[in-house]
Image (spheres, helix red, strand yellow):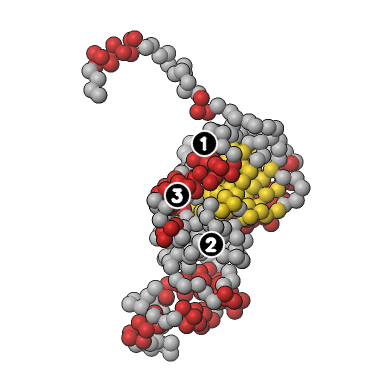
Amino acid sequence: MKISRRGFLGSAVATPVVAGTLVAGAASGAAPTRRGAARDIIVAAGNGLPYLDRAYALLTSGGDTLDAAIAVVTGPEDDPEDDSVGLGGLPNEEGVVELDACCMHGPTRRAGSVGAVRNIRNVSKVAKAVIEHTGHVMLVGEGAERFAVAMGFPRENLLTERSRKIWLLWKETHSTSDWWGPGPASPGWRPPAAAREARNLSPAARVDSLYARAMELGIEPGHGLGAVRRVLFPPTGTIHCSALNARGEMSGITTTSGLAFKLPGRCGDSPVIGAGCFTDQDVGSAGATGSGEENIRVAGAHTIVENLRRGMEPLEAGLDALKRIVRNYNGDMTRLKYIDMTYYVLRNDGAYAGVSLWEGYGPTEPHHIAVHDGTKARAERTVALFKGWSDEFPPTPSLPPERATK
Ligand code: ASP
């Protein structure tokens, strides 16, 4: 509709709006919805379980909800054995670790985020520093790294020897026609025809050949099959945590090294406010782990919090976000089989749910939500939208069962 200047002025005169006053009904979307009394509770992705006790102690001794959530997620960030977050995270396709994180502080209604940060371990804390020391919400790449250094975070090499060697194994595996891997002068070199044959090996023989190369590269025997698995099925992996206290204050945070062997500069959902994490303490908090690209397309965490606001229970709110992912694929199960997503949902009265698209990666690796609400830190199975296990992507036949260990 075309509005003439005269018509526009005429309508403006007819409906005077005083600057700063609310248009009727404009506040309804932000209306607080509390179902019951708030309580002290922390929920997190399954890998947060070992850190819930220390975080809960902080929360119940009057600590800030964001600090309590950070006490959980810095556990995996600092753990070199966890190769999905922080130190020791699996690197991008160039062998460089790039980390993402975002957080929301409910009491002050502020948000901070960093993406594709190199050389800084605790990006969860850097995301918080963005809140406290800038007027921005999101910093990425080199600028984010320089900001972190200015804030006193040490630069360090985040690549552990094991992560580096797993990357090297992956790199060599994807390089029959370049100069990575053994050259003609090396004992392990094979002429091009033999190398092509090696690529067409049966799954079991391929595992054996990759395992042998992993040993040659010096990967510790106890981690050889884990390395092979990571090469065949580049993993995702992340931690989210949401915390609520008895005063009704809430915060949420998500941190990750993202998809292994990703393109440099790739950001998944974890640094995206509204996708990897969203908190509105008038209603609740939600976060995500899994297929970042899928979650961004449904703004998962924000969708869930808005579902809570409209009155859905946490379980229903999370399942609805998963159904939106299914809708994006028109229910095509041949594609959805390779996608996985887990949401962690916490309402502002302490009601919570963990939901996932599939039950997990396999019977030995079901998805969990870790919970501490005063009794004991515990891991509970998520409620899955689909029965069964997601397939790993790229689609390669399963490892022999006795070897399918992480
Ligand atoms: N969501 C993360 C990402 O896409 C990975 C994960 O949660 O496993 O980077």
Compare marks 1 and 2 and give the one earlier in the sequence.
1
Of circles 1 and 2, the one toward us is 2
Residue of label 1: 306
Confirm whether residue 155 shows in the render.
no
Q: Nearer the viewer, residue 298 or 212?
A: 298
Residue 223, position as x, y percentages in the image: 58, 74
Q: Between marks 1 and 2, how big is the CA–CA gap?
A: 28 Å
Q: Amino acid at mark 2?
A: Trp
Q: Between marks 1 and 3, how big is the CA–CA gap?
A: 16 Å
Q: Quadrant of the C terminus?
A: bottom right
Above or below, 36 relative to 355? above
Q: Quadrant of the N terminus?
A: top left
Above or below, 126 relative to 227? above
Residue 81, position as x, y percentages in the image: 61, 65
Of circles 1 and 3, the one toward us is 3
Q: Would residue 156 appear left or right of 265 to someone viewing this image?
A: right
Residue 36, position as x, y percentages in the image: 68, 32
- Residue, x 49% and y 80% (percent of image)? 204
Above or below, 244 relative to 370? above
Residue of label 2: 389
Q: Is mark 2 within 8 Å of ligand 1?
A: no
Secondary structure beneath dot 2 equals loop
- Residue, x 48% and y 65% (percent of image)? 392
Q: Amino acid at mark 1?
A: Glu
Residue of label 3: 325
Q: Amino acid at mark 3?
A: Ile
- Residue, x 56% and y 42% (percent of image)? 316
Compare marks 1 and 3 and give the one earlier in the sequence.
1
